[in-house]
Image (spheres, rainbow, N blue to C red):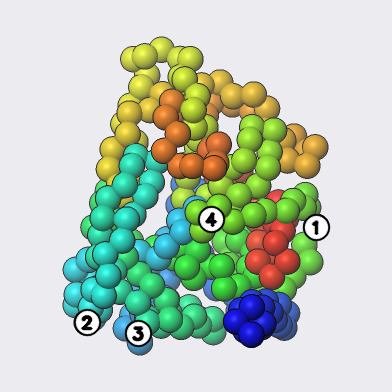
Amino acid sequence: MKTILIFARILLCSLIIAAGSLFGEVRMQVRDGHPIVDGVYVNGHGPYRFLVDTGADVNLIETNLARSIGLSATFRRQLASSAGVTVVPGGDGIEVLLDSVKAERQEFLFCGLEAFREHWPDIQGLLGQGFLSQFDYRLDLRGKRLAFGKQDPSGTRARFRMIGGRPVVSTSLGDLVLDSGAERLVLFGVEPNMNPGDRREMRTVAGYLRIGMVFSKPLAIEGRKIWRGNAVAIPKRNEPGVDGLLPLRLFNAVYVCNSEGYVVFE
């Protein structure tokens, strides 16, 4: 009986994701290839400006903002990134509204967001896979629109699987996380081959990391050549099961079909 109930819940979730066609569309800002949306409401408070980050397994909200709107910490959890792991408080049972799209019983981690606000001080939070995985959606980076619902775009289609709560696709460079928050293609377990003087620090939500650069082999997905150039090389593998981060800024648009487990690169 327990197995039947679990199967029924999974089936119901899939039907909810798959139901209907396009049911919501919002305009985005695109800053240095990063998608940003206005009009995010958290438990009825807002509107706020959030980064849309497909490479984050969780939603984040700035600590002081969370406190000001009465969000209470109900747990503490590890927040992981390429730089390591930190422990932060979080709250659950939160409602998120973006235009006509609503997700209930959401979890948010409360943190300082210095890694983002260093460049964009007006960013107040981050919508990660906790929110995005509830929907099929298309990130149109060229047209600056985020559209929710079932669609049928043309482009290179590839299956993805969830690893650590994030979508991962197989490429010629290994298994890469779909990451709209990444500035460059990132390769784990690779030694930099450029001048040591070119090395610098990369700031993440979990701290700092010393990085270098490497001239990458060509990136191809499903036989389609996508890109070749300088990638960030991180000698350590701090993120188990994946070989790096695939920045979505390499594409005009990306459609993620969570209801059927595939992505279309346009």
Compare marks 3 and 2 and give the one earlier in the sequence.
Answer: 3
Direction from residue 17 to residue 154 in the image, left or right? right
Does residue 143 appear in this view? Answer: no
Locate residue 72, reporting x and y percent.
23, 78
Locate residue 139, reporting x and y percent.
60, 61
Residue at horizontal 26%, vertical 55%?
87
Q: Quickly name the residue at label 3.
A: 43
Locate residue 90, reporting x and y percent.
29, 69
Could you tell me which quadrant the N terminus lies in?
bottom right
Q: Quickly name the residue at label 1.
A: 154
Residue at horizontal 43%, vertical 81%?
105
Query: Quick one: SS at disc 3?
Result: loop
Circle 3 Cα neighbour tier, 10 Å, few/some/many (<14 / 14–19 / ≥20) = some
Q: Which mark is residue 70?
A: 2
Residue flagged by tag 1: what amino acid is it? Ser
Q: Nearer the viewer, mark 1 or mark 4?
A: 4
